[in-house]
Image (cartoon, rainbow, N blue to C red):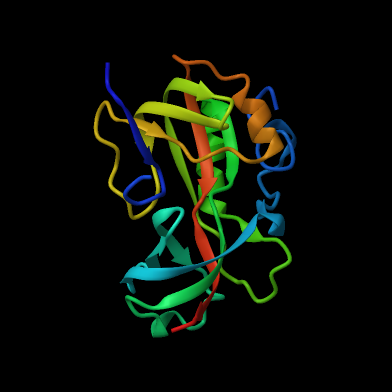
Amino acid sequence: MPQENRRTALKLLSGAAAATVVGLPLVARAESDDLVVPNRYENFKRGTIHSINPEGRSFVIVWQDLGRVKMKAADLVTNFAALRVGQTVDVHWYDYLDFLVAKTTPAVTARAKAMLAEGARLEGIPGARQRIRLWQMSGLCTKVDLATNTVFLINASGGEPDKPAPDSGEVIQMPPIVTENGKAALRTLKPGEQITTVFSQQTAIDVTIIR
């Protein structure tokens, strides 16, 4: 029996009864419907830049309470080229947001693929041209933790962009599910079922250099 790995799908070094997406049930959404990251999920935190990937337009930041976290820099981060390792910065950012939590079916797989191609937009953020990147992970459910609104997968496929694929037999703890539709879908899942999830990528929208 493999040991549960505390690695979440998008954090470095760590640590609705049917398929639903944010806002409406999957069956009620048209392919052209917009996928939105609501502004109520915006976060603010001060940290230290640990590493920068200019080609991927991403950086790893160290926060005292969260450890090292890798995030993309949206096009709104106009000073990305000025960021340096070791700088203390204030960051406005969006954490993972669940867009799809469902038992795997051909229709769910097709919808997840369409969502990844579409991406999501930020609610009420003027000047943002770039869509927020979405990512998928599917696999066998090994545990549903309703206390923390998380689900664990094994033999998973997919995953966060720019991250290595899971090892065979590795148990992946997915990010917490925060939307009401996602939580409702989570309550219908059981260990032993094949499930599909879609989350947004952790994304910074403003980075202010402090020192």
Can residue 57 be seen at all in this image of the molecule?
Answer: no
Q: Nearer the viewer, residue 27 or 191?
A: 191
Q: Quadrant of the C terminus?
A: bottom left
Residue farthest left in this picture: 168
Direction from residue 110 to residue 68 in the image, left or right? left
Residue 173 at x, y percent in the picture? 42, 34
Position of residue 167 in the picture relative to residue 202 (left or right): left
Measured as percent of width and height from the top left, residue 19 is found at 63, 28
Q: Which residue is situated farthest in the front direction here?
A: 64
Of residue 200 and residue 68, the one placed in the foreground of this image is 68
In the image, residue 76 lies at what x, y percent?
A: 56, 75
The correct choice, above or below, for 79 with respect to 147 in the image is below
Nearer-the-camera pick, 114 or 71: 71
Which residue appears at 54% of the width and 39% of the height?
176
Of 90 and 202, nearer the camera is: 90
x then y, percent, for residue 30: 71, 42
The structure residue drawn at horizontal position 48% and vertical position 83%, both measured from the top left corner, is: 79
Q: Is residue 116 visible?
A: yes
